[in-house]
Image (spheres, rainbow, N blue to C red):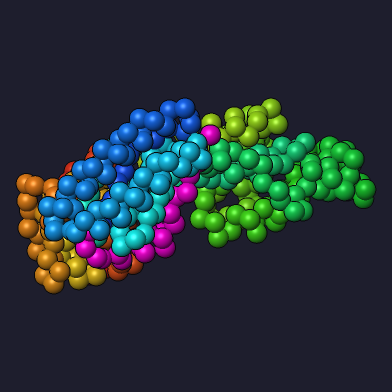
Amino acid sequence: MLHTDIPNPTSIRQLAAVREPFCVSIYLPTSPVPTESEPSRIELRNQVAAAARQLTEAGAGRAVVEELEDAIADLIQDRQFWSYLSRSLAIFHYSGHLQTFRVPNVLPSVLEVADRLYIKPLLRAITFPQTAFVLAVSQNAARLVEVSPDAGAYVVDVPGLPADAASAVGLPSISGRSPSGRIQGSEGQKVRLAQYSRSVDAAIRPLVTGSGLPLILATAEPLNGIFRGVSAYPLLAAPTIEGNPDERTPEELAAVARPVLDRLYAAQLGELTDLIEARFNEGRGATDLSDIARAATYGAIDTLVVDIDRRIPGYVDEESGAITFDDVDDAHNYGVVDEIARRALLSGARVLAVRADDVPGGGPAAAITRFAV
């Protein structure tokens, strides 16, 4: 099982706001299998040794280096911590603080020493969180399943959720004649299925509304079309998990839901690419890194897309946003793309971290600005 503690957007902005000397950011791949943790601990020791060298070269005193070494040594010796991991580990150390995040994305081993934290890899975990609700509904049962990368899949306890269609309409069966005798046969069945669907929708609405998560429907016709006709949830996914959901476990539903999520995210990226291209005609689209850096410095970015893997050493001027590139990645430089993302986050922009092939324009970043710059 994966064990994750993904930071929320507020936590990431707090990390982005840290500015002080001798910040250390470490990322390393891990395994959720406890017996496979030793290679990660060895890699962490190597990263700390490299961080100590960079800190010393940057003028940090021995006390700063020892503080880092002691904090990581305690973490390495914490057997319980290493028994509950995900696919990657992010570690941040600054001014006596040590923060860790276990994330489900497979991230490469990275060390960054600077006067700010290296947060760009974390953005991937909140860009496409791989979390959703699956509503498995048939005439015989209704379940709301939450799919997440950390807990896998589990059935959510939903107060007031009808046990089945018949109980929702107060009849032994939905296929017979109504008590009034005025509605019967297939027409009566559709009316009662609509009543059932409205009851299910009303029960789950308090739980899904405001979550920001997609709702994936697992059902068969005619319930599929009927439920979609009564539900007003704006994030109800267009694709349906077809077939009888009663025959699938929560884990099986999750396995089928994840490719649906991948298609949803691909569609979102496609729409964003089209929007950036449209904004170019209005003077509000940018793919040149220098233009994007200036826009981030002026607080002009509305939406930013960055390559999660691309690292470009250098620094961005605090006032003008001009970029100075460098060939050396050390404590005097930092990733300029990460710095652009940091400034955009702190100005309230939406920031998405994607793979290189998904960045509009094919560069390290692309942006939509709030106004022409």
> Foreground residue, 104 or 3?
3
- Give the residue displayed 34% in from the left and 50% down from the top: 70
Q: Nearer the viewer, residue 10 or 134?
A: 10
**Magenta stretch contains residue 232:** no
Residue drawn 42% across and 32% down?
A: 37
Looking at the image, residue 150 lies above or below residue 229: above
For residue 235, say whether it is visible: yes
Residue 351 location, x and y as percent? Answer: 32, 56
**Residue at 70 percent of width and 56 percent of height:** 202
Residue 252: give x, y in percent of width and height.
59, 29
Residue 323: quarter of image: bottom left
Q: Residue at x 27, y 44 (%)?
A: 48
Quick one: quadrant of the C terminus? Answer: bottom left
| Left or right of 43 on screen, residue 188 | right
Tell me if residue 272 can be seen.
no
Nearest the camera: 38 or 281?
A: 38
Q: Nearer the viewer, residue 171 or 305?
A: 305
Please state if 89 lies on the left or on the right of 307 as rendered.
right
Task: Point out the stretch of residues depicted in magenta.
Answer: 1-22
Residue 4 part of the magenta segment: yes
In the depicted structure, whether residue 226 falls above or below residue 87: below
Count of all numbered marks drawn on residues in the image: 0
Point out residue 197 in the picture as x, y percentages from the top left corner.
71, 48
Q: Position of residue 259 (x, y in %)?
A: 47, 34
